Image: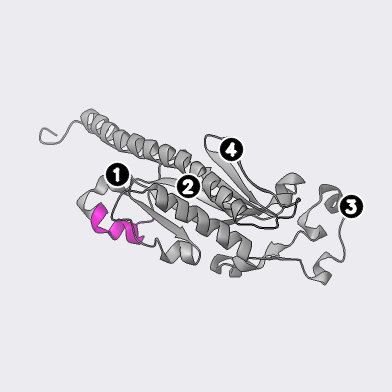
């Protein structure tokens, strides 16, 4: 035991170093989440300016829910941006953990996370609790402000590796544009007729998806095909 570190000292050291890294990562996350909301407002304003004959009932807006959530409404679609309060690490097989960045500084394995979900705007408007939302991207930021994005299509291959440089306003703007583009490019598909031919009174009262809420055809992802 004489040659071994005192357990109390070891615990104190781990808490001190790990907590400091996580706190810095969280500060980076919070700062970028605020900027992401500003970029979303800028993108929505640019879109509005480029629509020549917008129908009066087409709504384009950004709504702040709290410091960890805001919504971007694009006509019938709603993007929900959520900032997680917990700092996470990725699966040990993830490519990020094999990157030179983490190899040179293992403390950079700790990441802040922002998830972007696509809902139908009517799902929230009419409180249809069983309507699905689809995760279209998640943005990770480390203690040195480097980032990576996991998502579908362009969101994936444009940012599949950790960034060489710290994240910028331009990066956040591009992520927002791609997220909006992806959600509006995927149309709503109603459920097959036989599936909704019979419903219970409870389903009718609760306005459940069985009434024909539908699903997004473009979001039939790999993991969904495994669910029967």
What residue do we see at 35% from left, 40% from top? 25
Q: Distance of mark 2 from mark 4, alpha carbons?
A: 15 Å
From the image, which quarter does the N terminus lie in? top left
Q: Which residue is mark 2?
A: 114
Left or right, residue 71 beside residue 202: left
For residue 28, what is the image quadrant? top left
The reply to whether dot 3 and dot 2 touch (C-beta < 8 Å) is no
Tell me, for residue 104, which label it has, or none: none
Q: Which residues are magenta?
A: 91-101
How crowded pointer 1 is (Cα within 10 Å; few <14, some 14-19, many 20+) is rated as some
Which of the two labelled residues, at mark 1 and mark 3, occupies the earlier sequence position?
1
What residue do we see at 70% from left, 50% from top? 121
The reply to whether dot 1 and dot 2 touch (C-beta < 8 Å) is no
> Residue 24: where, in percent of width, then height?
33, 36
Q: Which residue is mark 3?
A: 201
183 or 133, nearer to the observer: 183
């Amino acid at each position: 035991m004489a040659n071994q570190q005192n357990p109390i000292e070891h615990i104190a050291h781990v808490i001190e170093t790990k907590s400091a890294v996580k706190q810095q990562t969280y500060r980076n996350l919070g700062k970028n989440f605020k900027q992401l909301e500003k970029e979303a407002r800028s993108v929505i304003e640019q879109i509005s300016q480029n629509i020549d004959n917008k129908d009066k009932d087409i709504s384009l807006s950004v709504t702040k829910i709290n410091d960890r959530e805001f919504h971007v409404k694009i006509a019938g679609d709603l993007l929900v941006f959520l900032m997680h309060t917990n700092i996470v690490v990725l699966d040990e097989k993830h490519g990020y953990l094999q990157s030179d960045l983490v190899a040179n500084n293992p403390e950079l394995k700790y990441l802040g996370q922002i998830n972007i979900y696509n809902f139908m705007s009517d799902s929230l408007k009419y409180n249809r609790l069983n309507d699905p939302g689809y995760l279209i991207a998640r943005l990770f930021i480390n203690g040195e402000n480097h980032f990576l994005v996991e998502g579908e299509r362009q969101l994936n291959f444009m940012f599949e590796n950790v960034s060489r440089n710290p994240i910028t306003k331009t990066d956040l703007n591009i992520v927002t544009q791609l997220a909006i583009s992806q959600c509006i490019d995927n149309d709503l598909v109603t459920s097959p007729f036989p599936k909704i031919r019979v419903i219970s009174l409870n389903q009718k009262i609760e306005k459940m998806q069985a009434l024909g809420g539908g699903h997004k055809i473009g979001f039939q992802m790999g993991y969904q095909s495994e669910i029967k």
